[in-house]
Image: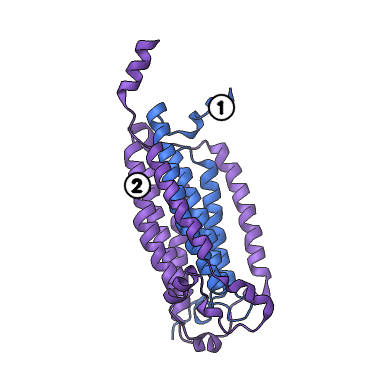
Chain colours: A blue, B purple
């Protein structure tokens, strides 16, 4: 039998904390994406990543497979995740419409150029 | 040595794919590559949903997100990708600040995730005994206002959550209608005539 150094990780079930950590990585990537990208569509991608990190947390807290006790969110977590997915679709449509309008008027997609309200 | 617990193996596989492509979205400066990395990242998050027992939400993730939202986003990329907007570099000073903020945020969140005892994984025998039920019917009934998963709830304080999600469902559907009209209005094609009229007036 081959002994891999991390083999004990694979023989135990994962818990909620693993899911929360993956969600934290996605959330951090999304926040940094929103902060550093200059393309308006890049900012939109960052928002999608943040929403997916939150969704992963909702699913993990509602899962009976990861945590089988009465304090689990149960089906509420999955329903919340559904609403987040639907509202993310709506938000992406509106933001895309705004970005296209901005592109038509200014001939640019750089968010740093959107400074007319600075006065 | 114990044998491999396959859900854990697939959890690590999918989480590795989704996290690495999320980092790829952050680090890539080409907008087309970012969109492609985002597709792969979100698709493997759907795999994580399936592993957590949320089969319906995982299917919705693939259908709505990967099939709908991201196609919309890629259309946006194609409509706006002129030569000078495909590659937009971020100044390196901003990268340094972003690295420190991101590292501290990530460290904080990891510490919180590790710190709660109830969030650790359960025993393998216990986990193997759990029967996975399908969630499509309870979710559909919950959206109609009936919580079939909570019918035998005896605790009075928990019965408040039995009212279901009919109102939120209605609000979301009206919201989507408003968004449909609003987005179509915002992104409509401008008529050239208006500008010519304005020019002739001034």
Horizontal and vertical percent position of residue B128: 50, 87
B190 relative to B102, above or below: above
Q: Residue at x 56, y 27 (%)?
A: A117
User: Could one spot residue B47 in this view of the protein?
Assistant: no
Q: Which residue is mark 1?
A: A117
Task: Answer with the quarter of the image where residue B64 lies.
Answer: bottom left
> Given the image, what chain letter belongs to the residue carrying mark 2?
B
Residue A74's tag is none
Task: Answer with the quarter of the image where residue A98 lies.
Answer: top left
Q: Which residue is mark 2?
A: B74
Q: Residue at x 38, y 49 (%)?
A: B35
User: Could one spot residue B41 in this view of the protein?
Assistant: yes
B168 relative to B10, above or below: above
Secondary structure, mark 2, is helix
Q: Nearer the viewer, mark 2 or mark 1?
A: 1
Q: Residue at x 64, y 58 (%)?
A: B107
């Amino acid at each position: 039998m081959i002994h891999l150094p991390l083999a004990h990780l694979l023989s135990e079930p994962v818990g909620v904390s693993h899911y929360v950590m993956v969600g934290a990585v996605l959330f951090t990537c999304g926040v940094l994406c929103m902060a550093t990208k200059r393309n308006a569509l890049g900012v939109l991608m960052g928002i999608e990543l943040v929403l997916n990190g939150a969704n992963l947390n909702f699913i993990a807290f509602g899962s009976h497979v990861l945590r089988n006790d009465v304090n689990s969110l149960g089906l509420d977590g999955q329903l919340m995740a559904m609403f987040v997915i639907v509202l993310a679709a709506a938000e992406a449509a509106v933001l895309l419409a705004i970005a296209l309008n901005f592109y038509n008027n200014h001939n640019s997609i750089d968010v740093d150029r959107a400074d007319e309200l600075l006065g | 040595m114990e044998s491999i617990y396959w859900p854990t193996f697939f959890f690590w596989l999918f989480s590795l794919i989704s996290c690495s492509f999320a980092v790829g979205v952050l680090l890539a400066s080409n907008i087309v590559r970012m969109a492609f990395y985002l597709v792969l990242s979100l698709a493997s998050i759907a795999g994580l949903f399936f592993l957590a027992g949320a089969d319906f939400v995982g299917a919705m993730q693939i259908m709505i997100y990967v099939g709908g939202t991201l196609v919309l986003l890629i259309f946006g990329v194609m409509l706006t990708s002129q030569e000078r907007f495909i590659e937009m570099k971020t100044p390196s000073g901003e990268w340094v600040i972003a690295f420190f903020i991101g590292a501290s945020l990530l460290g904080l969140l990891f510490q919180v995730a590790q710190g709660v005892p109830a969030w650790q994984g359960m025993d393998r025998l216990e986990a193997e005994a759990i029967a996975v039920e399908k969630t499509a019917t309870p979710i559909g009934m919950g959206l109609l206002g009936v919580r079939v998963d909570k019918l035998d709830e005896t605790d009075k304080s928990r019965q408040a959550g039995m009212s279901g999600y009919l109102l939120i469902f209605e609000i979301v559907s009206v919201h989507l209608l408003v968004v449909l009209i609003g987005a179509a209005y915002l992104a409509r094609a401008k008529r050239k005539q208006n500008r010519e009229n304005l020019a002739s007036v001034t």
